Amino acid sequence: MVVLPALVAIVSLAGAFLIGRDAWRRASPDKVAWVVAFVLFSLAAAAEVVGSLGGWSPALVRVYYVSGAMLVVGFLGLGELYLLASSWVTRAGPGIALFMVAVAAALVAEAPVDPARLGQEGWHALERGPVLVAVTITINTMGTAIVAGGAAYSAWHFWRRRIFRHRMIGCLLIALGTLIVAAGGTLTRLGRPEYLYVAMLTGVSVIFVGYLEARRREIPAARAAVSSASVNVTPETPARPAHQGSNGHARHDLDPAIEFLVALLALESATEIEQRCRFWSVDAGAAPHLSRDQAHRVWAIRLRLPPVSRERLDRLSAAAQAQIADLYHEVLAPGVTALHADRQNFLKSPPR
């Protein structure tokens, strides 16, 4: 039966290509880890197809086991860790990945393969000792817990704040897909391998759809911000700030998020601006130009900045401008919106 493994390989390659394209446009370690995970998904499924059609070999068995059975969920978990705890994982992540790959490769390389069982049992001919089994279960259990738990926590955070509905749904789908993949591996270890690729295809597809949903930008919201910034605003006739300070910067008392950006853009060093954005969980990309979506977001905040801040923004690189736009649209503005919503709910609640 090669249809299901072939479909898993195709879906995984599509996921690796899309995430890889996103990582190329805006580099981030979590995307790199997920690209590796989807490539491993595809590699394991392709090994199953080749082994089923052309016969298994000891090398093919080892490729299948180390990529599909051991490492794929581990790299999904590493990618989720980059999102949840980027400060220390950024430093420790490469070491974690190398250690995980080295241990898995060494254990699988030393595990014997029974040639007499290759023809009938395929990759099950790999003799898995207690250490190999324990390490495999540990990597998969920890990876599943990190991905499912982290995605569920992010979804709860978005739901509680009433922001980023697309990301909330995407996180829930990623958590569900990871649990489905884990269930397939568990059933295989319990002696029901016929469900492995049903679970793999379903789980990988759900994870892929979850990523697609989570990556959807709120372009209508950005365009609404442009519309609300000023009725007749052009680059030659910028919008006037609400209050002008002695230093030439505006005081946007009605928008604390813009006030924060004004203070941020007052910093002299572009490196310091980037570091401040990183502190607020927004990494810098590496693309030399803005995408259409990024251009909408940068333009939306540019219209709301005072002239001095606008000129400072224009002098920054495209990657830095996109980083500041992400900081505003994904961190600062949602926080202000949630604060206003909480105040409205408080005012509407009846006195006790």
Image (cartoon, rainbow, N blue to C red):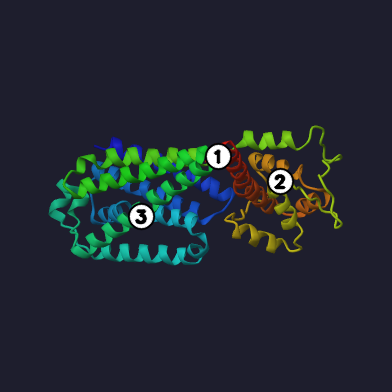
For residue 340, side relative to residue 150 (left or right): right
For residue 216, side relative to residue 58 (left or right): right
> Is label 2 or label 3 in front?
2
Q: Quadrant of the N terminus?
A: top left
Between 34 and 274, which is closer to the camera in this rendering?
274
| Residue 75 image point, x, y percent | 40, 55
Q: Is mark 2 in CB contact (under 8 Å) with mark 3?
A: no
| Kind of element beneath mark 2 | loop
Q: Amino acid at mark 1?
A: Pro
Q: Is residue 315 visible?
A: yes
Residue occupied by mark 1: 351
| Kind of element beneath mark 3 | helix
**Callout 1 environment at 10 Å: few (<14), some (14 to 19), or many (20+)?**
few
Give the mark nearer the N terminus: 1 vs 3: 3
For residue 108, side relative to residue 291 (left or right): left
Instruction: Tell me the residue at 60%/49% (across/down).
Output: 331
Q: Is residue 18 visible?
A: no
Give the mark nearer the N terminus: 2 vs 3: 3
**Callout 3 environment at 10 Å: few (<14), some (14 to 19), or many (20+)?**
many
CA distance separating discs 1 and 3: 47 Å
Q: Is residue 226 above or below residue 16?
A: above
Residue 45 appears in which quarter of the rendering? top left
Residue occupied by mark 2: 255
Q: Amino acid at mark 2?
A: Asp
> Is label 2 or label 1 in front?
1
Between 92 and 166, which is closer to the camera in this rendering?
166
Q: Amino acid at mark 3?
A: Gly
| Residue 154 image point, x, y percent | 47, 48
> Is label 1 or label 3 in front?
1
CA distance separating discs 2 and 1: 29 Å
Residue occupied by mark 3: 143
Between 74 and 121, which is closer to the camera in this rendering?
74
